[in-house]
Image (cartoon, rainbow, N blue to C red):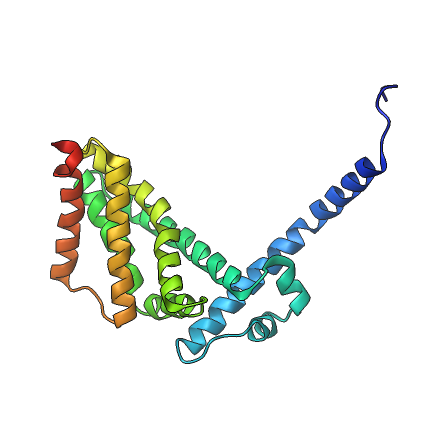
């Protein structure tokens, strides 16, 4: 050990705390997953008939309030985490669907169909239940759109560039916000897009790349 380096109490405390946290990491990951899965199951069961309480979630997870608040400061924070978890799953699904196509138009079509799959049951009811359990209906809907728009827009950028967009990042972002807003409309009205509507939405996205301001 260097003569100029004398361990302090703070150094020891930080080292022990970091070591303890490293050992608890897998346990904490498991706790969070159990809480997320339990919350999703309970919210899906109740739908929009009753708001789920923290007590309902921890009971379903077989855990304590202390465990819940160790990871989430509030139920709203858990709802945000659920939306992020759902976005990860949806993004993975859309990536898989887009990988089935080579042409950029085909990839955009797969993207649209993948995103709109959220309007089908049982996904639609479950997603609506999670949004409804946010602090307010309006805030829940906005959080869902914002949460999903960034990764989903990113999936469109390469195809938009191939279609001729001079500003693929911006055009993809605008398209993602628009389509996710439409998904929200379908969810809150309990409707599903018709085949003609899906075609219209697909053409809208393709036009966003081929006829956007950046291409003129």
Q: Residue furthest top?
A: 3
Q: Quarter holding the C terminus?
A: top left
Q: Return the x and y of residue 6 as percentages of the image width and height.
A: 86, 27
Of 30 and 191, nearer the camera is 191
Q: Return the x and y of residue 4 as percentages of the image width and height.
A: 85, 19
Asked if residue 105 is positioned above or below residue 68 in the image, the reply reads: above
Q: Quarter holding the N terminus?
A: top right
Which quadrant of the view contains residue 66?
bottom right
Residue for point 28% across, 43% down: 173
Which quadrant of the view contains residue 56?
bottom right
Say whether residue 68 is left or right of residue 210: right
Residue for point 45% across, 67% down: 135
Residue for point 21% across, 45% down: 108
Residue for point 63% across, 62% down: 69
Of 120 and 184, nearer the camera is 184
Asked if residue 199 is positioned above or below residue 75 in the image, the reply reads: above
Q: Return the x and y of residue 52 as percentages of the image width and height.
A: 50, 74
Say whether residue 190 is left or right of residue 61: left
Say whether residue 131 is left or right of residue 66: left
Q: Return the x and y of residue 91 as percentages of the image width and height.
A: 37, 49
Of 36 and 81, nearer the camera is 81
């Amino acid at each position: 050990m260097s003569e100029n380096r004398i361990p302090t109490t703070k150094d020891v405390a930080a080292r022990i705390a970091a070591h303890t946290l490293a050992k608890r990491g897998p346990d904490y990951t498991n706790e969070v997953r159990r809480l997320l899965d339990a919350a999703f199951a309970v919210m899906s069961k109740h739908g929009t008939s009753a708001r789920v309480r923290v007590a309902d979630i921890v009971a379903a997870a077989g855990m304590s309030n202390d465990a819940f608040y160790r990871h989430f400061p509030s139920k709203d924070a858990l709802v945000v985490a659920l939306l992020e978890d759902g976005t990860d799953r949806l993004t993975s699904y859309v990536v898989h669907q887009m990988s089935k196509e080579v042409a950029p138009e085909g990839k955009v079509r797969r993207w649209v169909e993948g995103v709109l799959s959220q309007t089908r049951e049982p996904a639609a009811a479950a997603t609506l239940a999670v949004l409804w359990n946010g602090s307010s209906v309006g805030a829940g809907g906005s959080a869902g759109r914002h949460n999903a728009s960034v990764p989903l827009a990113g999936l469109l950028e390469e195809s938009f560039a191939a279609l001729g967009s001079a500003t693929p990042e911006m055009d993809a972002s605008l398209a993602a916000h628009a389509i996710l807003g439409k998904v929200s409309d379908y969810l809150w009205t309990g409707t599903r897009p018709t085949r003609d509507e899906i075609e219209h939405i697909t053409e809208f996205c393709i036009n966003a790349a081929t006829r956007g301001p950046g291409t003129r």
